[in-house]
Amino acid sequence: MAFLTQASQQWFTRPADERFVSLDEMSKAMNGLCDRSLSFVENTREIVVVPDENDTTNQGLFVYAGDSMLAPTHHSFGQLCSRASPSASPASFFRENSMPAPLVADALNYSLRFRRGAQDNVFVLATDDKLRAMTSATYGRVWNAEIIDLLKDRFGDGVTGDWRVPGEFGKKVTVDRENTTLYASDRDMFVFLANEGHRIEVPDRRDGKSGSLARGFFVWNSEVGDKTLGAGFFLFDYVCCNRIVWGADQFHEFRFRHTKGAFGRWMDQVMPILDKFANGSPKSVQRTIQAARRRKLRTDNLDQFLANRFGRGMVQPIKTAHEADEGRPIETVWDVTVAATAAARSLPNTDRRVEVERAAGRLLQRAG
């Protein structure tokens, strides 16, 4: 049985103050963070790093940028080091060797002033006297608050409507900080919502028996450059107590790098799908699945059929994935789409994985 662990990884690692019991609570926190933040462009030669004289461990640093003295976070310190020395990654070297702050400051100041170009600018994000991000000047920031508010507009508070924090083994739960799937911090955000009340009936779901699937999606973002802006859409059987998604099918992913046009591409490409997920009837999905299940494939032409749509390198992985999950060879278009999305999850290259997932989605839509 195919499964997704993205939400489970969040569940295992998030402390209590990064867990939210509704989109309303999440929105309030992220909008407050946004309102207290200041973004500006600074030339690297104007940035100065100084040791924290009050730090008895001799490890603390401050960064002077934009007339402010800022304490770097763990993440922004890594970005600062990358900006200072683009051909190396000194942050890990400084940390692993517990180098004293004055020596680290001298090394970074030298690189910022003499190893960078005179016109080299960086995009700085400061919040509450903290340096949260130091990215390239062309970085296209998408605020976590913007994404969360868009989700609120479509899905309500995420705990009382059709689309909500998923239950445990299909049963509704009272959402608390232990079982929530709404996470955010000053570094990133992750949302998992599902519609388990309007399930999609699938004849001959598994072992000759009928079954049903719920719809779900992930949305993630980082306004400090820690990860892409993205979303994943899928069907699934149930979610267990530690937030693993079991029986996942038809996983389709969209990722956008934080360039100047990232938010516009998100609105054009992802929000229409979210709207369809929120307002569409499960019957249309059910009809598409049934049509794909009825469309039989010629076994003597299967390899060429797969190669034409996914590339020759994916033929054997797709066939192997289906036999591993279903215990039989591929017979229908539905089998192909299920196996292709399962095989795509093992691909290390994100662009290639998304390419295979989208090809499977196109194949399913054409079958319907």
Image (spheres, rainbow, N blue to C red):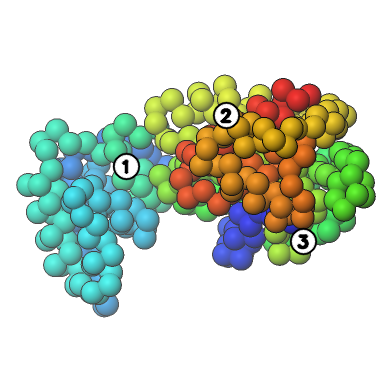
In the rendered image, which residue does mark 1 sit on? 135
Report crowding for label 2: few under 14, some 14 to 19, many 20 or more residues within 10 A (C-alpha). Answer: few
Q: Earlier in the sequence, mark 3 or mark 1?
A: 1
Query: Horizontal and vertical percent for residue 253?
Result: 59, 38
User: Dividing the image into 4 quarters, which one contains the C terminus?
Assistant: top right
Residue 88 vertical position relative to residue 119 in the rendered view, above or below = below
Label 2, label 3: how far apart the Cα atoms are = 37 Å
The residue located at (27%, 77%) in the rendering is 57
User: Dividing the image into 4 quarters, which one contains the N terminus?
Assistant: bottom right
In the rendered image, which residue does mark 2 sit on? 308
Q: 124 or 359, which lies in front?
A: 359
> CB of mark 2 within 8 Å of CB of mark 3?
no
Q: Amino acid at mark 1?
A: Thr
Query: Of discs 2 and 3, which sits in the foreground?
Result: 2
Q: Amino acid at mark 2?
A: Asn
Q: Earlier in the sequence, mark 2 or mark 1?
A: 1
* One can see residue 156 in this view: no
Q: 193 or 244, which lies in front?
A: 244
Label 3, label 1: how far apart the Cα atoms are = 38 Å
Residue 182 vertical position relative to residue 366 in the rendered view, above or below = below
Residue positioned most to the left: 114
Total numbered labels: 3
Q: 223 or 208, which lies in front?
A: 208
Secondary element at image label 1 = strand
Q: Earlier in the sequence, mark 2 or mark 3?
A: 3
Residue positioned most to the front: 300
In the rendered image, which residue does mark 3 sit on? 240
The residue located at (40%, 44%) in the rendering is 225
